[in-house]
Amino acid sequence: MKPREDLQAIIGGVCYQVKGSTLLAHDEHWNWHRPEREGRKTFLYRNQQGYFWVNMTLGGEQDIEPLEEEEAYAVYTALPEHEVPVEKAFPNIEPL
């Protein structure tokens, strides 16, 4: 289950939306009930405005939170599924 395509949020005057954004990494295929996940799934995106993640709960909540590039990189490295290679996802950061 992925975030809704029409999911968007205006934060600090900037519109972050799933539609048209690039999915960089996620943990979609991980079990909802694993204790360390606390019933959450995480999807990391990038669009023209910057990086953001969508956190989904087992109950259907979907929240968007903008991230600085360094924060997004930390999330990317922690997520098990990468849709875009690190050098393309973070061209301004030297990979570890």
Image (cartoon, grey):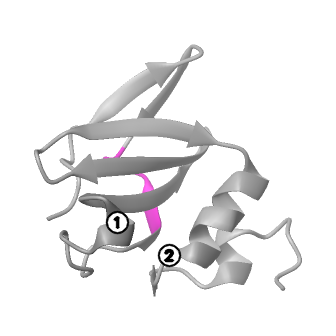
Distance between mark 2 and mark 1 Cα atoms: 11 Å
What kind of element bears circle 2? Answer: loop
Choose top left, top right, bottom left or bottom right for residue 42.
bottom left
Residue depicted at x 48% and y 60%: 44
Front residue of this view, candidates 9 and 30 = 30
* Residue 19 belongs to magenta span: yes
Circle 2 is placed at which residue position? Answer: 79
Magenta-highlighted residues? 18-24
Callout 2 amino acid: Leu
Callout 1 amino acid: Arg
Residue depicted at x 18% and y 47%: 4
Would you place residue 95 above or below residue 17 in this image? below
Would you place residue 17 above or below residue 94 in this image? above
Choose top left, top right, bottom left or bottom right for residue 6.
top left
First in sequence: mark 2 or mark 1? 1
- Mark 1 Cα shell of 10 Å, populated few (<14), some (14-19), many (≥20): some
Pick the quarter of the image with the C terminus. bottom right
Circle 1 is placed at which residue position? Answer: 37
Would you place residue 16 above or below residue 43 in this image? above
Pick the quarter of the image with the N terminus. bottom left
Residue depicted at x 30% and y 61%: 41
Q: Position of residue 18 (x, y in %)?
A: 34, 47
Q: Position of residue 47 (x, y in %)?
A: 54, 49
Q: Is residue 44 found left or right of 67 in the rendered image?
A: left
